[in-house]
Image: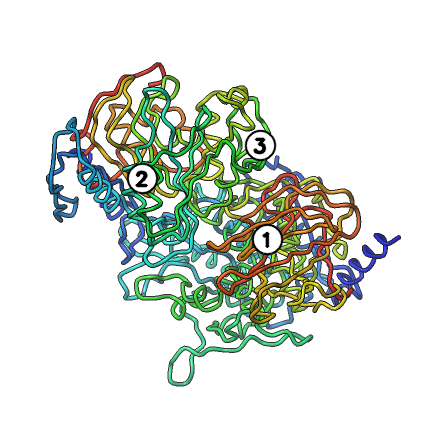
């Protein structure tokens, strides 16, 4: 509540500043993130408008049915804001774009992206993409896409296909930004061509922790865009180029996502836990910032986010993020902190 | 021998310009460490007003027009307009230092013209994205100390331009006080649209150049201002920086500020939003830049290259956006000046579309071999400025096309595409298969990347070898498909066999260098199919 008051005050601040600009187009440019816990019963917007709650709210650690998850994803994406039409994944009207949904492979007990969440997200964007490719490429060789995934294609009105980025065609692509990785001063990385050639990327990832990163959210999916066919299984040749945070930031900056959906039935806190929260929005680092806060992390201290912000990829200041739906403290669960955070 | 002949032909075609026939265009380039300045400073250090003034005067001296000097070119009693770039004021969220012309440069030019020329009236004229003080509208006013201000009255304080402080009004009064015989004033071009006798905004068609070139935009008539049309002598005084939509902004792009916002804005939006909507061509704004310049091309240019912005023209809220170069460029050829600016920012001038258009309209030359740069060595001062995120250079325009791919290539039709994208199906009519070819000359063996934008199914061959087969039925995007290629020295031939998808067959082709940043590779030229 205090943070909301701060944002309201902040929005009004230019009106009383010594030098200011008056514009009749008063669109609020504060990054918006839809943040919905499974117990969401409605909330008030900063302007006093009411956001209706979920039809079947449930406890944050309850086991939910597919309809409940679908309702949460839909609401979070509805509230998650839109960017300029040119950039938005959800522009008004039809689109001929090729959208890649970058998901994460599970690793042992650690859950990957949930296909049900992706299915809900696909329903939200189906009218706005001519082709949707679901893509992943983890540290291990893939065993193929399970029926849970395949049914997304059969249920969608859009053309949906699947790509294993580890074995995709790739291009040695130089970074347009100054690279972070210490042993890769040229910034050249082999990147799956699906990623380079698509029009937009949407990231769907579970909330998890990682021993080297702290919160491992949407950006961690970018580990998958560097193909295992080049970097090995696991990607030790990639790790040889620099620290994980540096590599992640470099890979991410090759083609940042235009939309992010975080959360799902299982989160990873060193073990599988239920933490029924969805965060979604068109400002990727703002979504990561809000989700980090919901996991008890201060995003300003998360290394890879700080690097992304330094290269102009967004913000990591929770005080500058407008969460719509729940406030972060209403869905807070303290995840385990590693040495990074 | 073949390569030499090609190079000769290329050089000859570029040299076939009237300006270069009699005398090389001269540009003055002065850096703050130039040895003939009274006092010098490091290119990395803030400058004092006295050094800026000295740099401007030296650059004008070095960049003397064909008339012998700037003052000699200005006829006695004439109305001189000085057009800076003051697109924003500091209260705007998009503003940051380096966004607009340095007021010290503006004052130095104003002083020079007032002191040396016999001009009767000197007007500083600009139209920015802020309303004038007296505008009764409630939106888009810049506010300072609770009071609406505009370009004339905004007080920049002592820090924005080191060693200079105050307002534009104060600057005009100061110079006017020293030259009481001259009328010195300011005109807000945003409110200066040409109107018909009934008071309605009047559209005027782009004047044809001596060689018969009219508008580049599909819509040839524009709202323009009385000041630009009627003044006798126009000096463009822009800031040099990167631009999201056209690569660089300097002398020519400065003309966007001459489009009256009272005609091109919309309720609540005081910018040239309708200028973009009505006159953009093929996703580029170069067409309306050069069209606007045609109403009164610059008679002289002084470019502020002291501080500029990389990646985009306004504030991107990154600490490393501002580039300090401490340079001044001056000369009477705006095309040459902008070509030099693009080179100083590390661009390949070939990629700047507006330079090609302005050269076609005989506004000047973009061939730096035809330009004498006096003062400092641009080769030592050039550096790489970061490009906009989605930057791409100028795609090939010279094509051979056919709806009968099995016919001999000699029988294919030569076409020149006015835009980056070739609409093959539109040019050749409905069909199942087309073929297009392009020739590109490389000065040596070149390793680079082929950037293809495609709508359709295409097989690509380079010098007879198939190098790709692609199918794209989603959104068309220039540079979507990228692949490493190697060109041999001399002529290389690219051939695309294309089948349309949903009746559409679109193609764009660009070849970048090893950096693969969207710039056309150095030493590479697309060849006319008729040569």
- Say which label, 3 or 2, has the lower sequence index: 2
Mark-to-mark CA distance, 1 and 3: 36 Å
Which residue extends farthest front? A147
| Residue drawn where x is 71% and y is 67% of the image | B412
Q: Could you tell me which chain the residue with mark 3 belongs to?
A: A
For the question of whether residue B180 can be seen, the reply is no
Are the residues under badges 1 and 2 in a single subunit?
no
Residue B250, position as x, y percentages in the image: 57, 55
Question: For residue B406, what is the image quadrant?
Answer: bottom right
A154 horizontally vs A74: left or right: right
Question: For residue B63, what is the image quadrant?
Answer: bottom right
- Numbered tag placed on residue B303 in the rendering: 1
Q: SS for tag 2?
A: helix
For the question of whether residue B466 can be seen, the reply is yes
Where does label 2 land, which residue? A118
Residue B482, position as x, y percentages in the image: 58, 45
- Numbered tag placed on residue A291 in the rendering: none
Crowd rating for badge 3 (residues with CA inside 10 Å; few <14, some 14–19, many 20+) = some
């Amino acid at each position: 509540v205090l943070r909301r008051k701060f944002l309201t005050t902040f929005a009004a601040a230019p009106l009383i500043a010594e030098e200011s600009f008056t514009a009749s187009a008063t669109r609020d440019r504060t990054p918006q993130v839809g943040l919905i816990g499974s117990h969401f019963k409605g909330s008030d917007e900063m302007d006093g408008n009411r956001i209706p709650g979920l039809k079947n709210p449930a406890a944050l650690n309850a086991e939910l049915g597919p309809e409940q998850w679908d309702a949460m994803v839909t609401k979070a994406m509805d509230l998650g804001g839109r960017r300029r039409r040119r950039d938005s994944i959800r522009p008004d009207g039809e689109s001929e774009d090729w959208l890649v949904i970058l998901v994460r492979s599970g690793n042992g007990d650690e859950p990957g992206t949930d296909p049900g969440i992706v299915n809900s997200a696909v329903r939200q964007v189906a009218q706005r993409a001519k082709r949707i490719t679901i893509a992943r490429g983890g540290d291990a060789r893939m065993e193929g896409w399970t029926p849970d995934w395949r049914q997304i294609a059969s249920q969608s009105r859009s053309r949906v296909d699947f790509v294993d980025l580890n074995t995709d065609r790739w291009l040695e692509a130089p970074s347009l930004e100054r690279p972070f990785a210490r042993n890769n001063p040229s910034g050249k990385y082999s990147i799956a061509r699906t990623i380079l050639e698509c029009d937009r990327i949407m990231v769907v990832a579970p909330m998890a922790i990682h021993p080297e990163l702290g919160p491992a959210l949407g950006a961690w999916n970018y580990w998958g865009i560097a193909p295992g066919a080049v970097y090995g299984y696991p990607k030790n040749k990639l790790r040889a180029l620099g620290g994980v945070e540096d590599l992640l930031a470099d890979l991410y900056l090759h083609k940042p996502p235009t939309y992010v959906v975080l959360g799902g039935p299982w989160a990873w806190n060193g073990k599988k836990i239920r933490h029924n929260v969805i965060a979604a929005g068109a400002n990727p680092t703002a979504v990561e910032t809000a989700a980090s806060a919901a996991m008890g992390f201060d995003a300003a201290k998360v290394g890879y986010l700080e690097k992304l912000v330094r290269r102009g990829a967004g913000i990591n200041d929770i005080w500058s993020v407008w969460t719509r739906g729940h406030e972060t403290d209403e869905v807070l669960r303290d995840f385990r902190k590693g040495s990074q955070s | 021998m073949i390569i030499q002949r090609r190079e000769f032909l290329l050089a000859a075609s570029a040299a076939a310009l009237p300006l270069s026939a009699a005398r090389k265009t001269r540009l003055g380039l002065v850096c703050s460490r130039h040895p003939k300045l009274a006092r010098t400073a490091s290119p990395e250090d803030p400058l004092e007003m006295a050094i800026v003034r000295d740099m401007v005067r030296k650059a004008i001296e070095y960049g003397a027009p064909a008339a012998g000097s700037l003052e000699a070119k200005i006829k006695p009693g004439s109305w001189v307009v000085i057009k800076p770039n003051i697109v924003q004021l500091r209260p705007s969220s998009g503003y940051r230092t380096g966004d607009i012309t340095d007021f010290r440069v503006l004052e130095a030019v104003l002083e020079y013209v007032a002191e040396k020329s016999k001009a009767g009236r000197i007007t500083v004229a600009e139209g920015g994205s802020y309303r004038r003080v007296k505008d009764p509208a409630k939106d888009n006013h810049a506010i300072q100390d609770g009071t609406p201000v505009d370009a004339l009255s905004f007080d920049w304080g002592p820090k924005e331009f080191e060693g200079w402080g105050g307002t534009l009004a104060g600057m005009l009064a100061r110079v006017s006080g020293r030259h009481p015989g001259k009328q010195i004033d300011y005109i807000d071009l945003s409110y200066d649209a040409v109107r018909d006798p009934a008071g309605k905004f009047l559209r005027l068609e782009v004047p044809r150049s001596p060689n018969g070139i009219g508008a580049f935009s599909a819509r040839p008539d524009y709202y323009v201002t009385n000041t630009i049309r009627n003044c006798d002598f126009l000096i463009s005084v822009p800031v040099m920086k990167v631009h999201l939509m056209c690569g660089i902004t300097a002398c020519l792009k400065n003309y966007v500020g001459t489009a009256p916002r009272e005609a091109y804005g919309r309720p609540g939006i005081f910018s040239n939003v309708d200028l973009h909507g009505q006159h953009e061509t093929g996703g580029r704004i170069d067409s309306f830049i050069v069209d606007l310049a045609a109403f009164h091309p610059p008679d002289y240019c002084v470019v502020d290259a002291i501080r500029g912005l990389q990646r985009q023209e306004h504030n991107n809220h990154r600490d490393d956006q501002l580039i300090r170069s401490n340079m001044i460029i001056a000369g009477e050829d705006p095309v040459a000046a902008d070509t030099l600016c693009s080179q100083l920012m590390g661009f390949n001038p070939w990629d700047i579309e507006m330079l090609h258009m302005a050269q076609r309209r005989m506004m000047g030359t973009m061939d730096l071999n035809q330009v004498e740069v006096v003062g400092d060595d641009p080769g030592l001062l050039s550096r790489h400025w970061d490009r906009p995120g989605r930057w791409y250079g100028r795609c090939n325009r010279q094509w051979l096309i056919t709806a009968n791919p099995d016919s001999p290539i000699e029988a294919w039709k030569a076409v020149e595409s006015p835009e980056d994208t070739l609409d093959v199906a539109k040019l050749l009519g409905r069909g199942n298969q087309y073929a297009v070819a392009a020739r590109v000359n490389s000065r040596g063996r070149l390793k680079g990347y082929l950037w293809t934008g495609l709508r359709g199914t295409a097989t690509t061959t380079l010098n007879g070898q198939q190098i790709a087969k692609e199918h794209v039925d989603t959104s068309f995007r220039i540079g979507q498909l990228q692949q490493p290629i190697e060109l041999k020295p001399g002529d290389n031939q690219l051939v695309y066999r294309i089948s349309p998808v949903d009746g559409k067959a679109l193609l764009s082709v660009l070849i970048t260098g090893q950096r693969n940043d969207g710039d056309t590779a150095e030493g590479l030229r697309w060849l006319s199919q008729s040569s």
